[in-house]
Image (cartoon, helix red, strand yellow):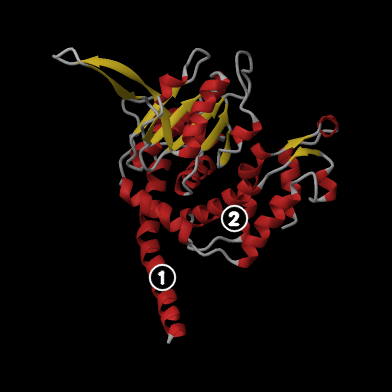
Amino acid sequence: MAQGAGSASTTSLDDGIVATAETCLSAIHEAREAIHGVIFGQEKIVDLALVTILAGGHGLLVGLPGLAKTKLVETLGTVLGLDARRVQFTPDLMPSDILGTEILDEDADRRRSFRFVKGPVFTQLLMADEINRASPRTQSALLQAMQEHFVSVAGERHDLPRPFHVLATQNPIEQEGTYPLPEAQLDRFLLEIDVGYPDRAAERRILIETTGVEDARARTVMTTEQLLTAQRLVRRLPVGDAVVDAILDLVRSARPEGGDPSVGKKLLWGPGPRASQALTLAVRARALIEGRVAPSVADVKALAEPVLKHRMAVTFAARADGESVTGLIGQLAAKL
């Protein structure tokens, strides 16, 4: 009897996943197409940003100026029905400028009390523009909010909205006056997304469609509740043993100790268990974006670099020999 009840429960759960997946797949496909209609020639970047949000994480966009990073975040907010805000990080930005502060109010009877004024972090999608230009203290305040999903001001807890995502940007060439994120803080980002130049055909389309009287405008496709449903679905999707083993093989082989001998000696440090967790969520989200309800080893290979790149570092000697984190990840992914 107990066994029969258990089997029925499993079947019901599977049916529930299938029914939810059918609805979510349609909405995700429509959202993806709507974003591609505004952001040209950056299909991979768009998909990685969607993976980040569907997996419930935060992303670090690294790219040169003028490559539509800001427009991408604005478009994502509109299409996914999220309240989006942007903060330009500067050296004089204070934690209170992001989190909020308490102000002293006085009523008609001259009674005084403190009132909390929320900062821009109280949004669903926050663009932290040039995050490495702010001081470590300000960076830490944001990164703590990213991890804990609440802020504490004057001993009082203030919960952040749900969902809550941060897409931060960094400029890789302007290093003067910057404070690079420490490795422990970089680990808070689900993916590091490299934003490169568009190809010629995409740049031609950009020239034609963005220099006329009207630009293409994003439209809202999903609601917040639909997005939350999709995020819950990502955590319910089954992951086969072959995919789990591929994730473990990849992450564990990318460590200086106990990893791949040909790679480990070239590394200062490698990814921890949080990388395995990130990869497990990300491959599920990528499967959904591509219209599938189960991830594959191909998803692990495709997401190896954005998940691991900011969680590893090569030795000075290896850099002198022309080795790079990207190259080493490629070697490890090819063995899966």
User: Is 70 located above or below residue 280 in the figure?
Assistant: above
Q: Is residue 266 left or right of residue 196?
A: right
Camera-side residue: 131 or 38? 131
Q: Is residue 310 left or right of residue 41?
A: right
Residue type at numbered disc 2:
Asp
State the quadrant of the C terminus. bottom right
Measure the alpha-carbon separation of dots 2 and 1: 24 Å
Residue type at numbered disc 1:
Leu
Q: Residues within 10 Å of mark 2 (few under 14, many from 20)?
A: many
Residue 270 placement: quadrant: top right
* Residue situated furthest left in the rendering: 108
Instruction: Give me the residue at 57% from left, 21% from top.
Output: 136
Instruction: Give me the residue at 61% from left, 18% from top.
Output: 174
User: Is 68 located above or below residue 175 in the figure?
Assistant: below
Residue ID for mark 2: 299
Q: Is residue 121 left or right of residue 335?
A: left
Q: Is residue 291 visible?
A: no
Closer to viewer: mark 2 or mark 1: 1
Q: Position of residue 186 (x, y in %)?
A: 60, 34
Instruction: Give me the residue at 50% from left, 12% from top.
Output: 92
Q: Secondary structure at mark 2?
A: helix
User: Is 168 located above or below residue 293 in the figure?
Assistant: above
Q: Which mark is residue 22?
A: none
Q: Residues within 10 Å of mark 1 (few under 14, many from 20)?
A: few
Q: Is residue 45 left or right of residue 107?
A: right
Q: Position of residue 56 (x, y in %)?
A: 46, 46
Instruction: Give me the residue at 52% from left, 32% from top.
Output: 143
Tag 2 and tag 1, C-beta contact below 8 Å: no
User: Is 291 located above or below residue 187 in the figure?
Assistant: below
* Mark 2 vs 1, N-terminal side: 1
Q: Position of residue 288 (x, y in %)?
A: 47, 56
Residue ID for mark 1: 13
